[in-house]
Image (cartoon, helix red, strand yellow):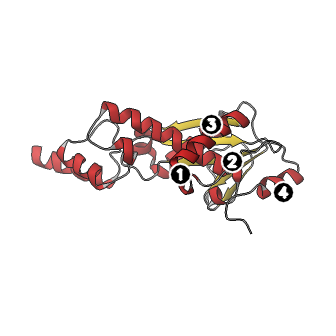
Amino acid sequence: MTNGPDFELETAAMADGALRIAGVDEVGRGPLAGPVTAAAVVLNPARLPDGLNDSKRLTAKRRAALYEAVFEMAEVSIAHATVPEIDELNILRASHLAMERAVAGLATQPDLALIDGNLIPRNLTVPARAVIKGDGKSVSIAAASIVAKITRDRIMWDLAQQFPGYGWESNSGYPSKGHRAALQNIGITPHHRRSFKPVHNILYQEKYISD
């Protein structure tokens, strides 16, 4: 038994006739700020990057190296759902929207999409299978998790330069102690998710005080 993901789910699907298989994952459901980002990755069975694993189990250096390897060896599509879309739809639906966009962005549509989680996005236009904790089971999903995480982390680093004080360069918008304190002390930016309770509560307080 291996400690990390493998290519067995993909091999089984190929035996059933699926030639192009995309691993799909998203990152950014929990943050108070920034988009949710999804990636779809179609690996080449003859050229798999060595050491693929759930992005959370990798060091930053290893994750960055694998990110480059995935782009070199695989077909990749990245997509997002914006903060307004998150606030309008809810975070689960927005994360599924980002996944749908990532799959749609592939140059050639896959025969099967392996989706990390227990739900299949409802507007996906290709056959799909939900894989619970898929980034630890499928190397295709693991590759997507790496691409999505690094892409979103870089977005948040860029936003941190425009909106200093929230610690986004290190917390990626997640509700760290410093981020929560900055919300109270500095205020809310256009990149904060107003439907999320810590942000909503501050907006409510401000409205109550101004009224």
Residue 23 is labelled as 2
Name the secondary structure under disc 2.
strand
Viewer-nearest of discs 2 and 1? 1
Residue 66 picture quarter:
top right
Residue 176 location in percent, x, y? 32, 54
Q: Would you say 16 lies left or right of 171 here? A: right
**Which comes sooner in the sequence, label 4 or label 2?**
4
* Residue type at tag 4: Ala
Residue at image position (68%, 47%) is 23
Residue 59 is labelled as 1
Residue 12 is labelled as 4
* Residue type at tag 1: Thr
Residue 208 is labelled as none
**What whole-number distance in Å separates the C-alpha atoms at marks 2 and 1?**
21 Å
Residue 25 location in percent, x, y? 60, 49
**Which comes sooner in the sequence, label 2 or label 1?**
2
**What whole-number distance in Å separates the C-alpha atoms at marks 4 and 2?**
14 Å
Foreground: 192 or 135? 135
Residue 79 picture quarter:
top right
**Which comes sooner in the sequence, label 2 or label 3?**
2
The residue that disc 3 covers is 68
* Residue type at tag 2: Gly
Q: Tell me, yes or no, if residue 165 can be seen here.
A: yes
**What whole-number distance in Å separates the C-alpha atoms at marks 3 and 4?**
27 Å
Q: Is residue 174 above or below residue 105?
A: below
Viewer-nearest of discs 3 and 4? 3
Name the secondary structure under disc 1.
loop
**What whole-number distance in Å separates the C-alpha atoms at marks 3 and 1?**
14 Å
Residue at image position (52%, 41%) is 150
